[in-house]
Amino acid sequence: MKIRNAEEKDLAVIVEIYNASIPSRIATADLEFISVESRIPWYQEHSPDSRPIWVIELDEKIVGWLSFQSFNGRAAYKATAEVSIYIAPEYKGKGIGKKLLSEAILYSPKLGINTLLGVIFAHNQPSLKLFDKFGFQRWGYLPKVANLDGTKRDDELPRRVDGRGF
């Protein structure tokens, strides 16, 4: 497995992997497929030096990605980032997410990040278990904040702070 910084040419695969997660209503609050064009501004908001997007390749094929997103645009939150992970359906359960999250934790200090957050649906048990495995604490709970096709869903906010293995 090889992790590298995403390039704009990778957006088609990043979007394909993301769109594959939408129908399950377990990993994203988007209800309709997104386009590559709609993700260009999102891609441009990221920087390899502070808020990278990574892709992970297996046999030279992109099978997943991770992004570091600023938690809040205000200066006092600069050392806090939300991490998002998406894996191609046929590669779930093969250690791809584990590898990405492990590298994110190790690399965070180089990005000036000392607090990592997740925003995960409470019914997304595989993701919550992954974050639990890496010492994230269930820090916040937002009941009924998402409406997925008429079903109200809760968000959990796991966090990991510097000093817990960074």
Image: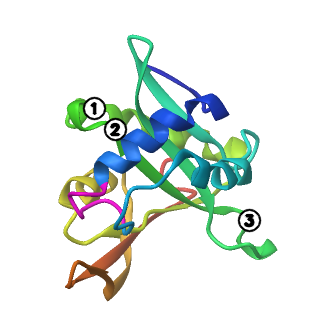
SS at badge 1: loop
* Residue 150 pos. (x, y %): 20, 85
* Residue 125 pos. (x, y %): 19, 60
What residue is shown at x 55% (from left), y 56% (from top)? 163
SS at badge 2: helix
Quadrant assignment, res 162:
bottom right
* Rendered view: 25 above or below 19: below
Quadrant assignment, res 154:
bottom left
- Determine which residue is flagged by label 3: 78
- Determine which residue is flagged by label 2: 98
On whether residue 126 falls in the magenta region, the answer is no
What residue is shown at x 73% (from left), y 49% (from top)? 44
The one nearer the camera, 82 or 27, is 27
**Whole-Å distance between the Cαs marked 2 and 3?**
25 Å
State if disc 1 and disc 2 touch (CB < 8 Å): yes
Crowding at mark 2 (Cα within 10 Å: few <14, some 14-19, many 20+): some
* Residue 30 pos. (x, y %): 39, 66
SS at badge 3: loop
- Determine which residue is flagged by label 1: 95
Q: Is residue 127 left or right of residue 107?
A: left
At label 3, which amino acid type do we have? Lys
Q: Find residue 28 and name its label.
A: none
Split into 4 quadrants, where in the image is the N terminus?
top left
Q: Is residue 59 left or right of residue 66?
A: left
**Whole-Å distance between the Cαs marked 2 and 1?**
5 Å
Range of magenta residues: 22-28
